[in-house]
Image (cartoon, rainbow, N blue to C red):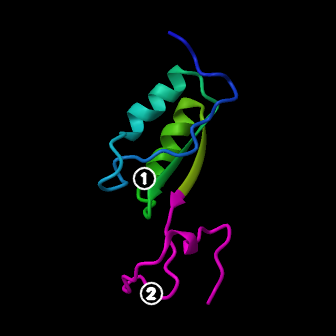
């Protein structure tokens, strides 16, 4: 079976903890990464970090470096306001500013 390059690392992965978006089970994901001899793997679930400890322990047991992250969204004023904005005014954490 072909192996991933030793320098390849998945940095955007959603698990079963990422509701409505992730289907990967942590043990299966880590087992596959170990099988492909990946040095590290990341978890980036949507807005939750419930799986971080489970992920961390599974990675350590498999000898893989865990990279823990979270995909979040920022509301300019309140998460309760559902105002639409043109695409050109959307911001990410890299260029977000306080109003």
**Could you say which is closer to the camera, residue 93 or residue 58?**
93
Q: Is residue 49 above or below residue 84?
A: above
Residue occupying image coordinates x 53% and y 25%:
34
Secondary-structure class at tag 2: loop
The image quadrant of residue 38 is top right
Q: Which residue is mark 2?
A: 78
- Residue 97: image x %, image y %? 66, 81
Left or right side of 79 for 23: left
Residue 99, given in percent of the width and then of the height, sits at 61, 90
Count of residue discs: 2
Number of other residues with Cα within 10 Å of mark 1, as a class: few under 14, some 14 to 19, many 20 or more:
some
**Numbered circle sitting on residue 67:** none
Please say if the residues under marks 2 and 1 sit with CB atoms less than 8 Å apart.
no
**51 or 12: nearer the eye?**
12
Secondary structure beneath dot 1 equals: loop
Give me the residue at 47% from left, 33% from top.
30
Q: Is residue 89 magenta?
A: yes
Magenta-colored span: 70-99
User: Residue at the left extreme?
Assistant: 20
Asked if the magenta segment contains residue 83, the reply would be yes
Q: Residue at x 36, y 53 (%)?
A: 17
Image position of 1 with respect to 70: above or below:
above
Other-residue count near label 2 (Cα within 10 Å), few / some / many at <14 / 14–19 / ≥20:
few
Image position, residue 25 (x, y; %) = 36, 39
* Residue at the limit of the structure toward the top, as seen here: 1
| Residue in the image at 57% along x and 16% along y | 3
Front one among 48 and 92: 92
Tag nearer the camera, 2 or 1: 2
Query: Residue 18: where, in percent of width, then height?
Result: 37, 54
* N-term mark: 2 or 1: 1
Residue that carries the numbered disc 1 in the rendered image: 51
């Amino acid at each position: 079976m072909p192996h991933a390059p030793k320098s390849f690392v998945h940095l955007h992965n959603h698990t079963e903890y990422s509701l409505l978006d992730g289907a990967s089970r942590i043990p299966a994901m880590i087992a596959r990464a170990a099988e492909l001899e990946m040095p590290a793997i990341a978890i980036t679930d949507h807005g939750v970090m419930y799986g971080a400890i489970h992920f961390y322990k599974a990675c350590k047991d498999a000898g893989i470096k865990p990279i823990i992250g979270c995909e979040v969204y920022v509301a300019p004023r309140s998460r309760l306001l559902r105002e639409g904005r043109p695409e050109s005014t959307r911001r990410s954490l890299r260029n977000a500013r306080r109003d």
